[in-house]
Image (cartoon, grey):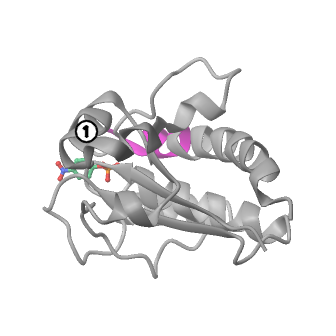
Amino acid sequence: MNKVSVCFVCLGNICRSPTAEAVMLRMVDEAGLNGRVVVDSAGTGNWHIGEAPDERAQRAGKQRGYDLAPLRARQIEQEDFAAFDLIVAMDDANVTALHQVAPAGERDKIRLLMEFAPNAEDRVVTDPYFGGAAGFESVLDQCEAACAGLLAALRPQLVD
Ligand code: 4NP
C-alpha cells in the first residue's frame, strides 16, 4: 500500500501550519485515506515549542469543526527532510528558513502551500499572529482551498 507524507511549516507552528494540519487531516479522513496520507506540522522558529495552537486559531478552527487543541508546536529538524515526502511552507520567509535546514539533496521537497490552489489570488498564507480575527478566517479559507488541491495532487501517488 502506497503512502505519502506531508509536513506543513510556518514560523511559530501555532497559527497557520497547525490549521493546515487539521484541515488536511479531516480531508484525508473524509476521503477514506487514513494512514495513507501522513500529516504533521512544524515551525521554523523555536519560541513556541510544546505549546498548543494560538487560542484564536483554535477558536476559528472549532467554528468550522476542526479540533486543533491536541496539537503541540515543534521545530522543524534536518531529519524531517528524510522523513517526509513534501515540506509545505506558508510563505517565502518559511521557504528561506527551510533552505537553511534542508540537506542539499532534499531541497526540492520544499513547496508553497498556495501552489496547490491555482485559482487563489494569493501565493502565500499571510501570518495572522499580529492581526485580528479576520486573518484567522483567511488562513482557514486558504488552507481549505489549497489542501483540497494538495490531496488531489497526491492521489496518483497513492494508487497501488
Ligand atoms: P504562525 O504565526 O507562524 O502561523 O504560527 C506566528 C506565531 C508566532 C509568532 C509569529 C507568527 N511569533 O512571533 O511569536
Q: Quadrant of the N terminus?
A: bottom right
Question: Which residue corresponds to the image point at 64% horizontal and 39% vertical from the top-left?
Answer: 146
List the residue tagged with mark 1: 99
- Residue lying furthest left in this view? 47
Residue at x 30% of width, y 70% of height: 73
Q: Residue at x 53, y 21 (%)?
A: 122
What is the span of residues highlighted in magenta in the rendered image? 131-138
Left or right? Give the position of 11 relative to 133: left
Picture quadrant where residue 75 is located? bottom left
Q: Is residue 14 visible?
A: no
Horizontal placement of 98 versus 112: left or right?
A: left
* Local secondary structure at mark 1: helix
Q: Is residue 38 visible in this depiction of the protein?
A: yes
Q: Quadrant of residue 25?
A: bottom right
In the image, what residue occupies the spot 54% across and 44% down? 137
Q: Give 77 or 55, whichever is nearer the viewer.
A: 77
Could you tell me residue 56's position as x and y percent? 40, 58
Is the residue 115 above or below the residue 71 in the image? above
In front: 136, or 42?
Answer: 42
Say whether residue 46 is magenta: no
